[in-house]
Image: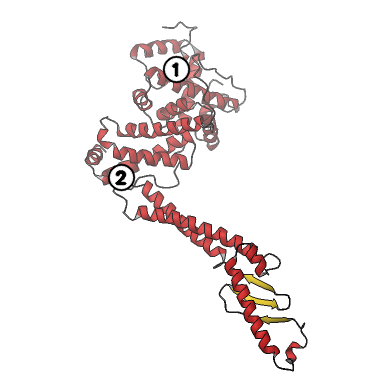
Amino acid sequence: MSGMNDHPELQLSAYLDEALSPAERAAVTAHLDGCSFCRAHLADLRATSRLVAALPALLPTRSLVPRLGRAPVWLRPVRLLGAMGSGLFAFLFIASAVINSGSNLGGGETTAEQLAEKGQFGAAVNALASDAAAQKDAARSAAPAVPAPAAAGQAPTRSSITTSAPSVIGVSQSTGSGIVYYRGTFGPPPVVFLGFAAFFAIAAIVAHRRLRRSH
Amino acid sequence: MRDDIDRARRGDAGAFDSLARAHERALYSHVARILGPGPDAEDVVQDALVSAWRSLASFEGTSFKAWLFRIARNRAIDVIRAQKRRGELPLDPPEDPDEPGWAEPAAGGPELIDMVAGAEAFAAVEAALVLVPVEQRDALLLRDVEGFSYEEIASITVAEIGTVKSRIHRARVTVRNELVRKGWKGSAG
């Protein structure tokens, strides 16, 4: 065993924990009787050990115990549909936001030509159909010799109409130039799509977590 | 407890549930001090409990708690190794075969042993533990917090007894030195 100047420092923790063999323990005890240096080290190690032992436990934020038994059979389809639905509605949200922001350029009015250039052919056709109907109405109203008093204060080539086409909110036109002013939207407001996307995402996450906790 | 283990091994989910609840917090507390508190540590414990249920038939030891800690601790170490491979964590330096240094305390600090009940001391010890290499921290916590014997720690960590002794001692010296660097003069005063 070590002499008085050969401190058994590496054995002090095991001594403290009573993890030495009887012979090793006896030798360390004998050394400690005559070595204040090692006694001081042992006291520090004991204090450190007590500090670590007294640490308050860290607590989880949720139960970590698995739910044993098979998960309900409908949980996997719910997770799949939730993920797919979330992706679909997120796409629709982005698409509607982009389309609606595009149709609102220039103060919210867009010509049929501009719509066609942007690939919104359905909206452009609607606008042109409204234009043609408006031209017929204008021709009928122009037949009487005396113009209507209400039109007297307006520019001679402008008239206003409204239409019941579902994607057209008010159409005004200039029949002389053939320019159609048009304001269109794509389906419901984008925030509705966003709400559905969030709903499906939450459903998918809940189903996923439930499946993870299951046997 | 032994009765619950026997019933759980026969497939009694209720018995395993009560066993898992008895050890859930201790497992999380240990894993959280290895990985850091949060969702990663929670996922590791949850996965470990699911794994324990699935492999319960293979449990033949005498200590169910040690068996659970072995599963959870191994998963936590796997997560750390993966994080190091991805460069998210720095690599531990190789273990120094020499004896660890012994920081000299400054005069005038409080007695280390008087700090045991202080919340300030707990925060300092938690901060010091983070500086201890993972394998040493793991062994120290298994000993001082969970009260496992050196033989059980050797089994849980799949290491030799001599390695366990060395890791525990080095971890204690590192924590003690960090506390001394924060102004405590230690018991040697």
Which residue is labeled 1 in the image? A12
Location of residue A9 in the rendering, given as x and y in whole percent from the top left corner: 47, 14
Give the residue type at disc 1: Leu
Location of residue B43 in the rendering, given as x and y in whole percent from the top left corner: 42, 41
User: Tag 1's secondary structure?
Assistant: helix
Position of residue B187 relative to residue B75, above or below, is above
Number of numbered discs on residues: 2
Position of residue B140 relative to residue B123, above or below, is above
> Which disc, if any, is residue A103?
none
Q: Which residue is at the far top?
A: A3
> Which disc, if any, is residue B17?
2
Of all chains, the one bearing label 2 is B
User: Tag 2's secondary structure?
Assistant: helix
Q: Nearer the viewer, residue B155 or B180?
A: B155
- The structure residue drawn at horizontal position 33% and vertical position 38%, both measured from the top left corner, is B51
Q: Nearer the viewer, residue B143 or A5?
A: B143
> Are the residues under badges 1 and 2 in a single subunit?
no
Q: Nearer the viewer, residue A186 or B120?
A: A186
Q: Residues within 10 Å of mark 2 (few under 14, many from 20)?
A: some
Give the residue type at disc 2: Asp
- The structure residue drawn at horizontal position 48% and vertical position 7%, both measured from the top left corner, is A6
Location of residue A25 in the rendering, given as x and y in whole percent from the top left corner: 38, 14
Q: CA distance from mark 1 to mark 2?
A: 40 Å
Mark 1 vs mark 2: give the one in front: 2
